[in-house]
Amino acid sequence: MSFAHAADGTSLYYEVDGHGDDVLVLIAGQSNNHHWWDVAREDFAAHFRTVVFDHRGTGRSDKPESGYDTRVFATDVVAILDDLGVDQAHVYGTSMGGRAAQWLAADHPSRVRRLVLGCTSPGARHGVERSAELRRALAQRDRDAAQRVLLELMYTPDWLATHPGPFHTIGDPDMPQHARRGHFLASRNHDGWDACAKIVAPALVLHGADDVFNPAANAPLLADRIPDAHAVLIPHARHAYFEEFRSVASPTVVNFLTVP
């Protein structure tokens, strides 16, 4: 059990596993803790020392009243790397974690060797947002119905029919309400458009082709905006492509990160 401390004193829980000379930091999505990566993480363990962590507001990390911002989340990763004594790492951020990863690569270029952005966007101002109909379905008062909508945005019907859960990609159930709202606002207010243009690390943009939760049209936008980037769309995949379609996604990431 390891803890780093952010610049504002927030305690951040993290874990390290795997082998290899290179470090790979895995950044989870909005309102999720390190268990977001439980299924896919082992795919990287033979190649990298993997680092997973609990965002501030989730899991074993502190849950301050303020400080929820994608740029702050990026500095939290820097604090963890500093605690490990790691100067540079590969970074793989998904969903809101991909938004934080944009800031990490732009603000701290010397710390990011290669960058993978999964199922993410540059933010509402320049990106493609989910439909108003989906927003209403996710905000409905019937929480069981809203959760079912979320699951169907994450996974295909075939996957849900054969995988009863538990699911670690639909939010940390123990998050306090102030932290949950902080994560929501951090993601909603993100604007990484200018930051993406400054990224110097080679970048891979991954997205499920059938993702409407964070529309797949954001992938080519990001790949065009980041100077040394290319996009890969995974056919039939939805938002949690890295779990359901890991047989495609994980080798794609490993190949990208290990190319000389």
Image: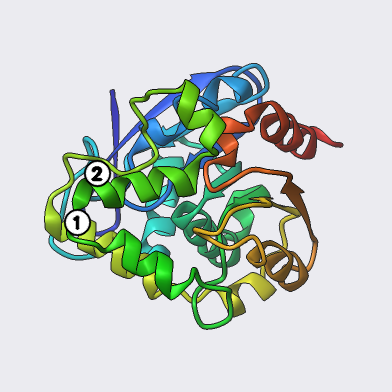
Q: Which amino acid does label 2 sit on?
A: Thr
Label 1, residues with CA under 10 Å away: few <14, some 14-19, many ≥20: many
The reply to whether the C-beta atoms of the residues labelled 2 and 1 are less than 8 Å apart is: yes
**Mark 2 / mark 1, whichever is N-terminal:** 2
Residue at 33% in and 62% down: 137
Q: Is residue 140 visible in this depiction of the protein?
A: yes
User: In the rendering, at what x and y percent does residue 3 appear?
Assistant: 28, 34
User: In the rendering, at what x and y percent does residue 237 appear?
Assistant: 63, 43
Q: Is mark 1 on a helix, strand or loop?
A: helix
- C-alpha distance separating marks 2 and 1: 8 Å
User: In the rendering, at what x and y percent does residue 152 appear?
Assistant: 45, 45
Residue of label 2: 58
Seen in the picture, residue 198 relative to 99 is either above or below; the reply is: below
| Quadrant in the picture for the C terminus | top right
Residue at 52% in and 41% down: 240
Q: Residue 216 appears in which quarter of the rendering?
A: bottom right
Q: Is residue 4 left or right of residue 209?
A: left
- Residue 179 circle label: 1
| Quadrant in the picture for the N terminus | top left
